[in-house]
Image (cartoon, rainbow, N blue to C red):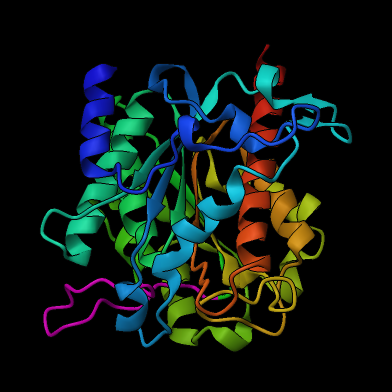
Amino acid sequence: MEATMKRLLQVAGARRLSPASINLGRSDDPRLGTIFTDDFPSARVVLLGFPHDEGCTRNGGRPGAALGPQAFRRFVTALGPIRNPEHEIDLTTSLGGGVYDAGDVVAADSTLEGAHRALEEAVTLVLQAGKVPFIIGGGNDQSAPNGRGAYAYLDSTSHSSPLGIINIDAHLDVRPLLGEDHSIPHSGSPFRELLLHQRALRTNGGAHFVEYACQGQQCSKEHADFVKEQGGTLMWLTKDVHRVSESFPRAMDIAGEHIFVSFDIDAVQGSDCPGVSCPGNVGLSAQDAMDISRMAGRNPKVLLMDVSELNPAVEDYRSPRLAVMMFYHFLIGLAERVQTRL
């Protein structure tokens, strides 16, 4: 475990939150900062940051998502009561371990592709250590290395079943890669990369891929057809989603035995979450986003979750606070998962 932690801090480790540096606030109202730990072996959840937005600009989007992890950490320790009176959950006793911040992934060669390789390795290491990765971006191109990290983990444990992927997003993000040889990834290509990965093809992973809360006015027919050709499921915002308490469990059922939940927060309506790379007029509500995060945490089949496209350069208060609340509700769900197992 010590070797894993050392390697993890080599591929990540930048700008990490150390419990010694956290202001714990009032003792009568402890917040998330109190469950952060420097003891990697005892941690239940590992936080990773992906501070890169080159994938967004490659795709014609606005810069600024590189600041997402920093904005997230600015709020994460001071929000979220550890003892939640509504759900009757005490995260200090129910989570099964603390939160370890492994920091932001760093690329030795200072390239986006190098950052992708570092993130993929970090996710694999965390999963192999028996912990739950939660990755905050950063551009949505991070979802490709996150998924590949889960692929590598499943292969290392001799699991032959597919990785189910749920892309919660206004867009489909299955655009072709850039360049003459179609080898340059970007924020619009991560799920094409994962669907065409040899492991997905070998295990019929496309049949366990769900596009959730996608919007017809934001997606091309060609890209929708591509998803269908791979065996994927399209759950449109206005036609199929409706109550997330009913539709998201259906998405998880389709995803199957091992699940990666990827949440591009531009799926949330701009009035609730304006600080994203590509805000929309319609979408999920902030409450929907928190409910989905809690359901993902509660489901023992969910291996990891990421949150993409948080862009503090556009708006730096309400939106990062929502991302933190999604993380908080993921932890609430994870605590419920632990309680159910007990």
Q: Quadrant of residue 56?
A: bottom left
At 37% from the left edge and 31% from the top edge, which residue is drawn?
A: 127
Residue 315 on image: x %, y %: 60, 76
Quadrant where the image shows the N terminus? top left
* Closest to the observer, 234 or 99: 99
Q: Is residue 115 visible?
A: yes
Magenta highlight on residue 184: yes
Residue 97 on image: x %, y %: 55, 20
* Closest to the observer, 288 or 31: 31
At 40% from the left edge and 41% from the top edge, which residue is drawn?
A: 162
Residue 88 in the image: above or below residue 16: above
At 25% from the left edge and 71% from the top edge, which residue is drawn?
A: 185
Q: Main secondary structure of the magenta part?
A: loop
Residue 39 in the image: above or below residue 232: above
* Closest to the observer, 232 or 184: 184
Numbered range of the magenta stretch: 171-188
Q: Is residue 151 visible?
A: no
Residue 163 in the image: above or below residue 236: above
Magenta highlight on residue 340: no
Residue 108 on image: x %, y %: 13, 53
Question: In the image, is 141 to the left or to the right of 25?
Answer: left
Residue 107 in the image: above or below residue 122: below
Residue 207 on image: x %, y %: 47, 53
